[in-house]
Image: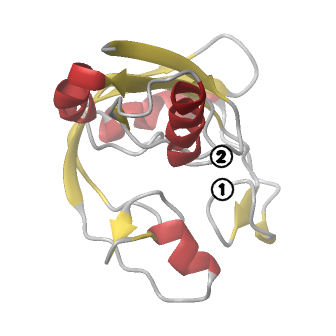
Amino acid sequence: MSGWLIIDKPRGMGSTQGVSAVKRVLRQNGYAKTKVGHGGTLDPLAEGVLPIALGEATKLAGRMLDASKIYAFTIRFGEETDTLDTEGPVIATSEVRPTLAQVEAVLARFTGPIEQVPPAYSALKVGGQRAYDLARAGEAVELKSRSVTIHSLTILPCKGRGTSEAGGGASGAA
């Protein structure tokens, strides 16, 4: 059995959990020896397309990591959490809110080739462990800056939502 299975990954499920669930179903249906892999790690907080490679397709899974992707995200101004995501406690608040024109004026700074330091609470691995696991355990996590390409940033005509089209390896939001 070879090919791709496209999963709509829900929030809270890790990419590895998705692969494990597929392996379990294959095993239960007589395909225990089928190789299974995924085309890129999504943080547990992320939801969306998770490509699962089966059999011979696992040889192509690495290409998915470097392929361009489109991320949709919501921004909430006025709160900072200690994890830089929605899971951590709020550590600072502000009543200041940028106007749409102010946000649009800075988008170009985050477009094109940029240096990006991934947050400590990311799915990247450090010494074989997920950075977010180390950070939640109270360990200091330093991730190196890396060059990524953000092809475009677009503000969608609904409250606080936008998209980012980025090269492989970029975090979901610039």
Packing grade of label 1 (10 A; few <14, some 14-19, many >=20) is: some
Q: Amino acid at mark 1?
A: Asp
Rendered image: mark on residue 45: 2
Which is nearer the eye, 166 or 24? Answer: 24
Q: Quadrant of the N terminus?
A: top left
In the structure shown, which secondary structural element does the residue marked by tag 1 occupy?
A: loop
Q: Does residue 47 appear left or right of residue 57 in this picture? A: right
> Which residue does the numbered mark 1 point to in the structure image?
85
In the structure shown, which secondary structural element does the residue marked by tag 2 occupy?
A: loop
Residue 151 location (% of width, % of height) = 27, 24
Q: Does residue 77 appear left or right of residue 133 in this picture? A: right
Q: Quadrant of the C terminus?
A: top left
Q: Is the residue 138 above or below the residue 117 in the image?
A: below
Q: Amino acid at mark 2?
A: Leu
Residue 13 location (% of width, % of height) = 66, 43
Rendered image: mark on residue 135: none
Q: Image point 32% across, 33% down: which residue?
A: 35
Residue 76 in sight: yes
Residue farthest toward the front in the current orientation of the protein: 30
Q: Does residue 118 appear left or right of residue 139 in this picture? A: left
Residue 84 location (% of width, % of height) = 61, 61
Q: Is the residue 139 above or below the residue 29 in the image?
A: below
Q: Quadrant of residue 10?
A: top right
Which is nearer the eye, 89 or 137? Answer: 137
Labelled pair 1, 2 in contact (Cβ < 8 Å): yes
Disc 1/disc 2 C-alpha distance (Å): 8 Å
